Image (cartoon, rainbow, N blue to C red):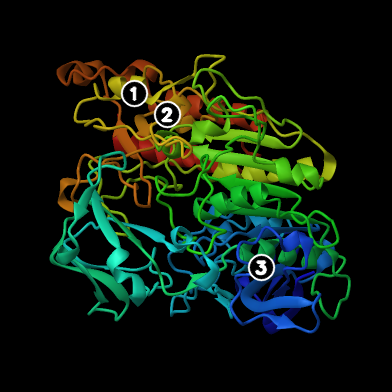
Amino acid sequence: MSLSKLEIKNRFITFNGKTFGTVGRYEQLEGTAHFRVSRHNPTDEFIDGLGNNLSHTENCSSQNLCYESFSADFVLIKPENMSNSNQSILIDILNRGRKTVLNTFNSNDQTITDPSAPLDEGNGFLMNEGYSIGFIGWQTDVTENDLGLMTMQNVPIIDPENLDREKQKMLMWFQSDNPTNYFNLSHRDHKTWLPNEDFLDSAELISREHPHASPKLVQRNEWSFSENSENGEACIYKPDGFEPGLIYELSFIPKTHSMPGIGFSVIRDFSSFLKYENDNNENPVAEKINFAYAFGQSQSGRFLRNYLYEGANVNQSGKIALDGIIAHVAGGNRGEFNFSTAQPSKDIFYTLPDPFPFTDTAQSRNNSSKYVSLLDKTRSTNTTPKIMFTNTSAEYWRGDAALIHINLDGKNDAEEDSENVRRYHFSGTQHGASKWPPPKQRPDGIVGQFPFNTIDYRPLLRACLSNLNLWVKSNIEPPKSEHPKFLNKTAVNSKNVMSKLEKIPSVSPQSKLLHTFDRSNKENHFPSIVSEIDETFNEIAGVRLPDISSPLATYFGWNLRHPSIGAPHLPIGITGGLAGSTIPLPINEIEANSNNDPRVAISKMYSSKEEYLKRVKTDALDLIDKKFLLKEDLEIIIEHASQKYLDIVGKQ
């Protein structure tokens, strides 16, 4: 396999030596994984650029043994005594170099924005279950800095000389929350792309007020390529300044090109090495790991959809690499993960490559006779893992999540590969799990027009992982898919729901709703389908936590930008960082009537706090019975509900 060596540099007992149930203590291994990929290896053929366009970094011992060498940071957390493990490893598909699974499954307080902090075990869920956890750098443009991001080294560079001019172009989107004269030539502060000085005149900058609005050309004499005076990075500079909230789109030809598709081989071969390499001197978990799962959220969830589409799950021995996958909040998108001018961090869904096909079963578009699915290539090699696609209200309102389970006519439900796939919609939630009370401002400085969404849906993901583990190991099927459906009339056009939501006092509607363009026909866009809502204006489709089934507020997956950061007509997150909303219900009918609030009042649903908590417990027990929640999460859900009631309703 292409992982030639696992170089361990540090090994120590982690989590302050804490003992986790019958599993015991955990140890942490850190080091460098060394890889080789070859254009002569059929399982690497999907990597764009791994052919005639290579720069002179290729090593050839003979005509048939040419390969590219590179390396990546890795961390392995495992039980000190592997005989106590559950024989499964969870691969964290890092989000822009940051670890995610401990925050997600262990509900720790360590955010992914602080990757250099010591690991926090949180509630210990993964450790108590006996999982090993693997982290490895897979993203070619993550830069080394003092934040502790996990990176790759000696990444192969593509010589652009043989590339078609159109394929040399890079597309960047920018949107600022404050007045600025600079935009760095990077996305999410990763590797800066220097422009090719031979083609500076071909660069073009346009602006848009909305992703679907007509572009306006920014004249070439109004801006220039420059160096950011604050950090020395390559940038574009506009003396008159860029307008906060306005969307800018830059097209230019960079000086060098990368090979980001090797990230797929990193995940495939890191997983395969830990599962199949039986030499104890080479593999620290030799013969102790039988199953490998991967979790990716947002950017890294889209990476996993792309991984499946490329058929990357078969290793050089023809064996399956990942046995199970949870692709979270990826919607119907993939991303820029496998072409020479790709920016893997890019999350601007209106400029990403063609995301078709969306579904796990075959579909066609534009009356074509050709039917394709997301899983065609994994099926051809018999390496389709068990898959859970989980999404929130945010990805539906973005205009793409429903595409994974509807036909493209926008009128019928798509079929499902029920042997291998589940699709779950977490009703009323936002892109990232949150908690009560709602912050007035996010850590990144974003301010919304409404209080941010406060639903903590991480208990649902813990149940998903538990169900996935049983599905893979014992063929015990997880709950059936839960999402909006045309069949039961819970799937409706977003404009129909928006016409209801705008009746809530103080709620401004989205002026232009978002949708996904058909990349094969620029005049066409796909239908934007979301869940229907009930009398509390909460979503009725999907997996409904007690926050939604016995609510004290209405929850959206979207929020509008505050006027103080510009473009108040736009939803937060068009250029990254989707946000939702929490709008408390009227306390009683007097309040509802005085504010012309059409939503049902809290007092009409619950006569007291005790009755409310009884409803919450009943709803949670129902989810436990259906395997959407774990028993150990019952008390924390009731505790959070109790605090929320006190804050919204008071002590009456």
Residue at 26% over, 24% down: 586
Question: Which structural element holds mark 1?
Answer: helix
Query: Which is nearer the eye, 487 or 306?
Result: 306
- Measured from the top left, where is residue 3 in percent x and y? 75, 73
Q: Which residue is mark 2?
A: 528
Query: Which is nearer the eye, 46 or 602?
Result: 46
The outermost residue toward the left is 240
Residue at 39% over, 67% down: 253
* Picture quarter with the C terminus: top left
* Picture quarter with the N terminus: bottom right
N-terminal-most mark, 1 or 2: 1
Q: Is disc 1 in contact with disc 2, using a CB cutoff of under 8 Å?
A: yes
Question: Which structural element holds mark 2?
Answer: loop
- Measured from the top left, where is residue 327 in percent x and y? 59, 47
- Measured from the top left, where is residue 10 in percent x and y? 66, 84
Q: Is residue 399 above or below residue 309?
A: above
Can residue 294 be seen? yes
Amino acid tagged 2: Ser
Query: Which is nearer the eye, 218 or 631?
Result: 218
